Amino acid sequence: MKIGITCYPTYGGSGVVATELGLELARRGHEIHFISYSQPIRLTGPEPNIHYHEVEVTRYPLFEYPPYDLALATRMAEVSQLYELDLLHVHYAIPHSVSAMLAKQMLAATPPRRNLPFVTTLHGTDITLVGLDRSYLPITRFSIEQSDGVTAISQYLRNRTLNLFDIKNHIEVIPNFVNCDDYMRKPEWVKTRSEYVSNDERLLVHLSNFRPVKRVLDVIEIFDRVIKAIPSKLLLIGDGPDRSQAEWLAVQKGIHEHVLFLGKQDQIREKLAISDVLLMPSELESFGLAALEGMACEVVPIATRTGGVPEVIEHGVSGFLADVGDVETMARYAIDLLGDEAELRAMGKRARAAAKAKYCASKIIPLYEDFYQKVMTQAGR
């Protein structure tokens, strides 16, 4: 198949999943065309069957806000016609599904007329935050209903979308995934652990885009309690609006020398593979991709019992869950686990086993392939 993929190319779950999906599909022989305003962050080099098409937005003094959605629709139509794409797959409803809808209408109205189906994947805040804004709710609902196929990354997000938007479409649940051969505790990566911690120290990690919903300050609060009981370091991977507050809080707590802000990283699997515990105290997660990536690397996740997270983490078996804002409980889970080497390693093994059982790319990518074929058949292609 020839598939066009559009996502936000930034450091966030939807862009990561879209890019990894494209890479996995390309490895299976499909021709993938990424269409976005910049190259996705995990598209780091030349890959077979991968093509990137930049969307250029012309800036006129008349436009206070350049119309990216219209430029994207035009580029989608151009690429689809030039490379004879079979379908478009857009990640994050706003504005990508609207642009795909316009591209489809353009191609249907312009000789040689052709029907280009498009699939919309819902990732979370496009529904729970942006889509509920009164300015966007009607167009979000309309673009979802106009999609030839709709998927959601968790049962939680599917149910929330149906309830909040009164959507009549069928929504297929296809969860996020991880390449279990790439995300694992490789010996050559484990050797680099000494660059961050000494033999008697534990290593905690947090990975996010540092938006308020990720509650990065809670990460610092949890670690402040952990380090008082267990010699340890904290790796913070990513960047975003709450980074400066987190840095200041670490200084105020007197733990800044033990908190390492690494910024955005291309190969996070190498950092996860040397870590012991992953902290994810988010206000809301529709899935929890960071937790899954950590689990595949035998890193035990300690997260909030919110959204789709309980679908990924089984409390007390493959990780721990607590209420949002309950830093005391999350710290206690971390301290107890980090103080018990045998249980730490055993739970890490169980976490990887859980990831392999349900969320390996080898299990999930065929679900997308089957869904694409179903959508194309229904569209008469």
Image: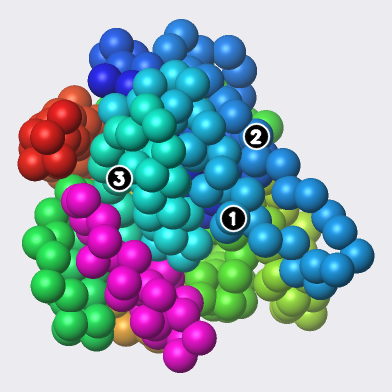
Packing grade of label 1 (10 A; few <14, some 14-19, many >=20) is some
Numbered disc in front, either 3 or 1? 1
* Left or right: residue 208 compared with residue 166: right
The residue nearer to you, when weighing 201 against 372, is 372
**As drawn, 381 above or below 350:** above
Q: Residue 155: x, y in percent?
A: 15, 64
Q: Which disc number belongs to residue 70?
A: 1
- The stretch in magenta equals 125-153
Quarter of the rendering containing residue 61:
bottom right
Per the model, the C-alpha gap separating discs 1 and 2 is 14 Å
Badge 2 amino acid: Glu
Residue 82: tell me if it is visible. Answer: yes
Badge 1 amino acid: Leu
Which of pointers 2 and 3 lies earlier in the amino acid sequence? 2
Quarter of the rendering containing residue 139:
bottom left
Badge 3 amino acid: Phe
Given the current orientation, which residue lies at the most extreme bottom position? Answer: 134
Per the image, label 3 sits on a secondary structure element best described as: strand
Q: Residue at x 20, y 51 (%)?
A: 149
Which residue bears the numbered disc 3?
Answer: 118
Q: Residue 159: x, y in percent?
A: 15, 74
Q: Are marks 3 and 1 in contact (CB under 8 Å)?
A: no
